[in-house]
Image: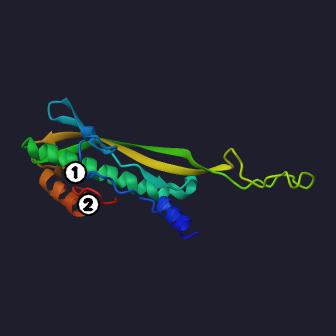
Amino acid sequence: MRRWLLALTLSVGGCVIAPSVPLMVPLDAGADHGYSDTMLADRRYEVRYLTPPRRTALDPADRTADIEAARSLAYDLALWRAAAIAEVLGYPAFTVDQRDASVTVEITDQNPYYGPYYGDCRFAYPYCDYGYLDRPYGYLRDAWLQVEARLTVTLRSHSGRGTLDASATGEQMRRKHPTALEAGVPY
């Protein structure tokens, strides 16, 4: 009984799974999350960030807080990447011209469970077997959430109205997400 309870506790566990690679990695690094950027024109980039998949509530009304947290994380890390691009290319500032996010929720049926079979054995005893069903009685359902943020940014050579300071933005995101560069830390 204890082993069964321990296995159930470990399998259900928490709602957040720690990624095995840091949050701030290129998307093509073999992870299921990370950033990517594409040069659209001179000094204009599209920066994308895809969050790690995380468990969420099955009921859509109960997953609002998870969606907002994942969306905020995706925007922050895309903004951090935009600031890094500006700094590496020698631009002290940038503007966010457009921002968008898409939310994907995948509901999966997995881990079939087999219930006891209590067929009508009143007339067949002792030939009746109170065994278990040979087909699944039901499935445990999981809901997984992933958010992709997309920013279109323009790199600026001077700070001005509506611009973000690249260095200050990068430092602010480092302070807000201090473990984003560490592997194995849940978000």
Q: Mark 2 points at which residue?
A: 177
- SS at badge 1: helix
Task: Tell me, for residue 80, which label it has, or none.
Answer: 1
Residue 152 seen from this side: no
> Given this view, does label 1 or label 2 mark the residue nearer the observer?
2
Residue 109 seen from this side: yes
Q: In which quarter of the image is residue 94?
A: top left
Q: Mark 1 is on which residue type?
A: Trp
Q: Which residue is drawn at 27% across and 52% down?
A: 23
Q: In which quarter of the image is residue 155?
A: top left
Which residue is more in the foreground, 3 or 172?
3
Q: Residue furthest front?
A: 126
Residues at circles 1 and 2 in contact by the CB criterion of under 8 Å: yes
Q: Where is residue 131 in the image (x, y as percent from the top left)?
A: 74, 53
Q: In this view, does 155 lie to the left or right of 22?
A: left
Report the quarter where the C terminus lies.
bottom left
Q: Mark 2 is on which residue type?
A: His
Q: Is residue 80 left or right of residue 136?
A: left
Distance from label 1 to label 2 (Cα)?
10 Å
Q: Where is residue 135 in the image (x, y as percent from the top left)?
A: 68, 44
Which residue is more in the foreground, 69 or 43?
69
Q: Residue furthest left?
A: 90
| Dot 2 crowding, Cα within 10 Å, few <14, some 14–19, many 20+ | some
Which residue is more in the foreground, 65 or 119?
119
- SS at badge 2: loop
Q: Position of residue 66 (x, y in %)?
A: 45, 57
Q: Where is residue 31 in the image (x, y as percent from the top left)?
A: 30, 43
